[in-house]
Image (cartoon, grey):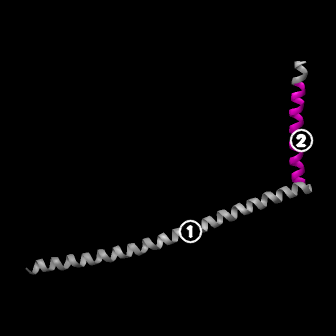
Amino acid sequence: MNESNQRVAQLEQNIVLLLNKLKDNHYALESLRLQLEDNQSKLKAIEEEKQVLRNENDSLSMANSLLGSNESNATTKHKINALIQQLDTCINQLQQLA
């Protein structure tokens, strides 16, 4: 009888330990869930800020090109040269047809 009482007491201790671990896991899970929500809201704010900065960058690039910066002048020259080459190709093809 004494041995069965010891086993019951050991089982009770194990159950108490398991319940405590379950409670700790629940608190840890809840903490992780809150961290996840916080990180998701931070990520959303960062994405929104990124979009705003991208729009501002595009606006500044446009303003620089209107002001005639060296970089935009080079880009514009390359585009014009590419268009001229396309026109030359078209003119040559038309002359061959005529």
Which span of residues is magenta-colored?
69-92
- Ranked by sequence position, the earlier of labels 2 and 1 is 1
Residue 50 vertical position relative to residue 4 in the rendered view, above or below: above
Main secondary structure type of the part rendered in magenta: helix
Q: Circle 1: is it few (<14), some (14-19), or many (20+) Cα within 10 Å? A: few
* In this rendering, position of residue 48 left or right of residue 11: right
Residue 14 vertical position relative to residue 54 in the rendered view, above or below: below
* In this rendering, position of residue 35 left or right of residue 5: right
Foreground residue, 49 or 10?
Answer: 49
Q: Gap between marks 2 and 1, in whole Å?
A: 47 Å
SS assignment at label 2: helix
Position of residue 69 measured from the top left corner of the image (x, y, whole percent)? 90, 56
Residue 39: give its label: 1
Q: Name the residue under label 2.
A: 80
- At label 1, the amino acid type is Asn
Of all residues shown, which one is farthest toward the top? Answer: 98
Identify the residue at image location x=89%, y=25%.
92
Identify the residue at image location x=61%, y=64%.
44
Identify the residue at image location x=67%, y=63%.
48
Specify the quadrant of the image occupied by residue 22. bottom left
Magenta-span inclusion, residue 88: yes
Magenta-span inclusion, residue 14: no
- At label 2, the amino acid type is Ile
